[in-house]
Image (cartoon, rainbow, N blue to C red):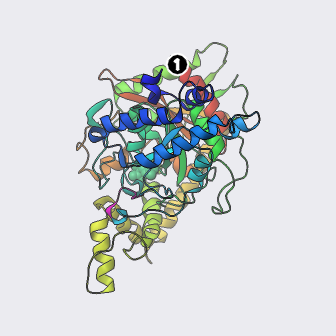
Amino acid sequence: MSSALNKLTIQQAHDGLKKKEFSSVELTKACLARIKKRNSELNAFITVCEELALDEAKKADEMIKKKKPFDGSRSKQKMLLGIPFCVKDAICVAGARSTGAAKILDNYIPPFDATAIKKIREQGAVLLGKNNCDAFGHGPSNENSMYGPVKNPYDLTKVAGGSCGGSAAAVADNMCIFSIAEDTGGSIRQPASFCGVVGLRPSYGRNSRYGIMPMASSLDTVGPMTKTVEDAAILMEIMAGRDERDATTVGDKSIKSVKSIKNLRVGVPREYFESEGMDKEVKKIVEKKIKSVETHRNASIKIIDVSLPMTKYAIPVYYIIVPSEDSSNLGRLDGIRYGVRAEADNLYDVYAKSRAVGFPEEVKRRIMIGTYALSAGYYDAYYRKAQKVRTLIIQDFNRVFEQVDILLTPVSPFPAFGIGEKKDDVLAMYLADVFVGPAAVAGLPAISVPAGKTKAGLPVGLQIIGPRLREDLVLKFASLCEKTK
Ligand code: GLN
């Protein structure tokens, strides 16, 4: 078994550690060896914390030896003890360089853990390093990272998706057991789809946002990227819950409460299949997957054709609200309070130069769009209008969830595209989020599970969208979809 320890899931690693089939040091070394072998090619990590990881693994082994974590009731508490993981670089981790993939934070080492990460580390998980991403989460291809793009493990000429391309590639390539990532408008689900892993965007407010580098505060979420749906559920149980540092969090933690998913009414929104630019092969793979779910024995699933006419407004709304919130949130990165400060003669130039060299083009573009949309005279026409249409999108979903329990859609209109292929076409990049944007704008939970592969061998994901705070249903249904062939 030891030759492929890095391929294990959380559940398998937990069981193996418990039975003393291997140690956490062996497991951690297996992941580090894989990172050493592959990272120069894939570029999935910006920072690798080798020494820290081995140190944490040793400590975990000592605890396991003393049988502390596995005695009866406490065994569940320490589910992650000794299990190596990594974190998107736009999430703060105490003591580990966290750049957000932008040079302005090249030297930033947070003094604190984001709440979600604190909960994971309190379980004894071993930190391997920080994953590459689009700078501060801006982008669907990882090409907006100032540390270079991530390559897709299935085809090195293709993108891994974005913004959490590094997390997706690290999980897909078995450089880690799991990764914790962030989804504002698809950043967990789309790369999960491109790299053939499981990625869950929780409901807005389910997990604390405290300690993630804020992009759009009314959409940002923290979620898991894993090898199985079971692992995603394990991590959600650990991360979910009220946090006094994030006033938008909810107390309810019912992640695994659904026992049976018999007699479900499953909606298939036609707008997600009629989209312009939809790849025929992707459409076929997703439709085949839906068919296999429908005919799954014993489940009595009823597929219902539904309509979400507001779908087409999700991207325009997203690209007003997100840059607006971005332009405000990114104001804190001024070269004075955090990170790298440019040399200049006066205060204004320190700000201007630090930001000029510290942000990539896409971040600057969003700051400018957002500042414009919020400015006096344009606020009503853009920002307020976008907020109103956002309400219509939420109402669209609410109406459909009276007819059906859950929705099935593609994650992306196409499989992983070529590195450089869309880089200069900003609109094409924005439109890549067409199927992941709506659930984000509405604050709903949504997961990407592998649905199949194209003839060229590229993974394609199926998206499952649930009503707000119904991660229990989404996860249970995802595990059924995972099993059907
Ligand atoms: N592609 C989306 C964007 O560029 C993804 C953002 C995210 O989820 N962090 O805004």
Q: Nearer the viewer, residue 354 or 293?
A: 354
Q: Nearer the viewer, residue 337 or 323?
A: 337
State the extent of the magenta-drawn residues as a range: 98-103
Residue 334 is situated, as x and y percent measured from the top left of the image, at: 38, 74
Please identify the residue farthest to the top as the structure is shown.
297
Figure label count? 1
In the picture, measured across the screen, residue 217 lies left or right of residue 88, that is: right
Residue wearing tag 1 = 291
Residue 355 is situated, as x and y percent measured from the top left of the image, at: 32, 71
Which element type, helix, strand or loop, lies under badge 1?
helix
Above or below, 419 against 3 in this view is below
Please identify the residue farthest to the bottom as the structure is shown.
346
Q: Residues within 10 Å of mark 1 (few under 14, many from 20)?
A: some
Determine the image quadrant of residue 10: top right
Q: Name the dominant secondary structure of the magenta segment.
A: loop
Q: Is residue 244 visible?
A: yes
Q: Does the beta carbon at disc 1 come under 8 Å from ligand 1?
A: no
Residue type (three-letter) at the residue carrying disc 1: Lys
Residue 483 is situated, as x and y percent measured from the top left of the image, at: 55, 20
Residue drawn at point x = 65 percent, y = 47 percent: 240
Residue drawn at point x = 47 percent, y = 27 percent: 5
Above or below, 335 against 262 in this view is below
Q: Nearer the viewer, residue 417 or 226?
A: 226
Determine the image quadrant of residue 349: bottom left
Q: Is residue 240 magenta?
A: no
Determine the image quadrant of residue 108: bottom left
Residue 271 is situated, as x and y percent measured from the top left of the image, at: 47, 37
Q: Is residue 99 magenta?
A: yes
Residue drawn at point x = 38 percent, y = 43 percent: 166
Residue drawn at point x = 32 percent, y = 59 percent: 362
Q: Is residue 125 visible?
A: no
Q: Nearer the viewer, residue 240 or 203?
A: 240
